[in-house]
Image: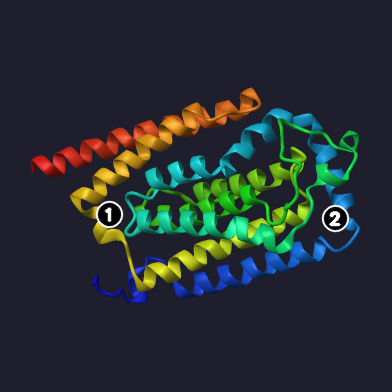
Amino acid sequence: MPPMNSPTQVPFSGTFLGYLFILSCAFVGLGYALSLVPFNLDALLFLNGWGRTSEALWSFLTQFGEGGVALLMLLVLTRWTPQGQSLALKTFLLGSLFSPLLKQLFVHPRPLSVLDPSLLNVIGQPISAANAMPSGHSLTVVACMTLLMLCLPKAHRLTPWGLIGLGLLALLSALSRVMVGAHWPSDVLAGAGFGGLVVWLAVQWEQRQTWQPQLQSQVGQVGLLLAELALVIYVLTASTHTPYEQWANDCVATLGIAGFLAHWRDHRRKILA
């Protein structure tokens, strides 16, 4: 049995993680409370209408909450952080598990399933079926960007402006779900909160049992390389509904190709050393 790891091996402070837990719970509670009041509709119509002037931006940003896109970014950008890829995989696994379960728990209708479509500015082809809360895209992008904000400074590759940039990307990508007509503001708030909780849970898991030794083995490295390559192919060939969504996919695929080649180069050097 692999050895247990002490909490101090995870490169994040307990105080920060405590704040993350409290803030995430607050967002979940705020999102649920907003879903119970008429202001949720007013906020949807206001924000969605305001987004009419920037359809290309919102269509581009909404793709960063797609699961394959987020996982590719995480695998590439957390590789130089201790336990980063182990945390990335656990975050993705927990998010993929909890998002559909939470939707079944809340069973909130999506805007397009209960409102006249003429009231909304619809961008692309957002889902109109039931089960809106929490927004899966918001959960995914907030979890992804939160983990990157935690990991990248440890690799000395991110300035304070970079942290602010990641925070803005998470905020705007989550907000884009309202702008494209796919979700209520309450769904986005709850999704953001659950995204933070997913990262918190992944760190707790990592404190007790890390996957990093297995991932650093030759078999683990080959598995990660194959996963990165598969994700690049998926992102390049995934169906999109606007050219701006495709541009977002192409940007992340380019990052993925660069990350794959750098990972392959380092792996070959390690084998030949």
Instruction: Classify the position of the C terminus by image quarter.
Output: top left
Quadrant of residue 102 in the image? bottom right
Q: Which residue is found at the position 68% from the left and 57% from the top? A: 103
Q: How is the image coloured?
A: rainbow
| Residues at marks 2 and 1, CA–CA distance in whole angstroms | 44 Å
Task: Find residue 5 and name its label.
Answer: none
Of residues 271 and 78, which is closer to you in this image?
271
Q: Neighbour class for label 1 at 10 Å: few (<14), some, many (≥20)?
A: some
Q: Secondary structure at mark 2?
A: helix
Q: Quadrant of residue 259?
A: top left
* Mark nearer the N terminus (2 vs 1): 2
Quickly name the residue at label 2: 40
**Residue 14 left/right relative to 1:** right
Task: Residue 252: give x, y in percent of width and height.
Answer: 48, 34
Point out the residue furthest to the left here.
273
Quarter of image, res 263: top left
- The label shown at residue 215 is 1
The local secondary structure at tag 1 comes to helix
- Horizontally, is 194 left or right of 86 in the view? right
Establish if 12 lies above or below 117.
below
- In the image, residue 241 lies at what x, y percent? 65, 27
Task: Give the residue displayed 62% in from the left and 66% down from the top.
Answer: 24
Whole-percent x, y for residue 5 in the image: 30, 74
Residue at 71 percent of width and 32 percent of height: 125
Quadrant showing the N terminus:
bottom left
Q: Would you call the spot at circle 2 few (<14 residues within 10 Å), some (14-19), or many (20 or more)?
A: some
Number of labels in the image equals 2
Amino acid tagged 1: Leu
Q: Residue at x 57, y 28 (%)?
A: 239
Check disc 2 and give the amino acid type: Asn
